[in-house]
Image (spheres, rainbow, N blue to C red):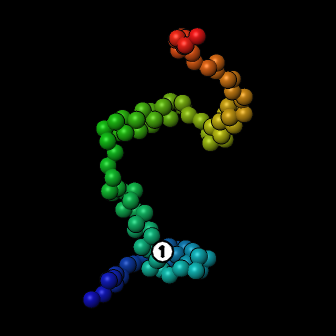
Amino acid sequence: MRTTRTLTVSLPPAMVEKLEQVREAESRTRSELVREALLNYFATRYPSDRPTQAEMAAIQRGRAAFKRGDSLSLDQLLNGMERRSHRPSRKKPAKTTGKRSSAH
């Protein structure tokens, strides 16, 4: 029994040209590229993992913040993290329990 099935697909000439360019550049078969494209399509349109209500709420808050302009570029984020990570940290004093040893 075969583990794959053959499928015929019609594509516009420009798409076939691009497919051939990518196929040659990556030394892959047309089937490999089409399989990968379909897997990516399925993963983005029909994910197998659904976000929880809390995750969806966080996503919606993030999207709203982005629309308001409350966002950072990757460079801004990385530069901000770099500045913070180079600060010397202060040593905290050792905690004392306030209890004294009864053996004098």
Residue 76 makes an appearance in the image? no
Residue 48 makes an appearance in the image? yes
Question: Which residue: 30% across, 87% down?
Answer: 2
Question: Which residue: 37% across, 78% down?
Answer: 9
Three-letter code, disc 1 = Leu
Q: Is residue 13 left or right of residue 50?
A: right
Residue 20 picture quarter: bottom right
Of helix, strand and loop, which one carries label 1?
helix
Nearer to us in this view, 30 or 100: 100
Nearer to us in this view, 86 or 38: 86
Residue 67: x %, y % from top left = 49, 34
Q: Is residue 103 left or right of residue 44?
A: right
Considering only vertical position in the picture, is 13 above or below 52?
Answer: below
Residue 96 picture quarter: top right
Q: Is residue 53 left or right of residue 86?
A: left
Nearer to us in this view, 76 or 13: 76
Q: Quadrant of the C terminus?
A: top right
Considering only vertical position in the picture, is 68 above or below 102?
Answer: below
Residue 8: x %, y % from top left = 35, 82
Residue 103: x %, y % from top left = 55, 13
Given the current orientation, which residue lies at the most extreme bottom position? 1
Q: Quadrant of the N terminus?
A: bottom left
Considering only vertical position in the picture, is 95 above or below 86?
Answer: above
* Residue denoted by label 1: 33
Given the current orientation, which residue lies at the most extreme left position? 1
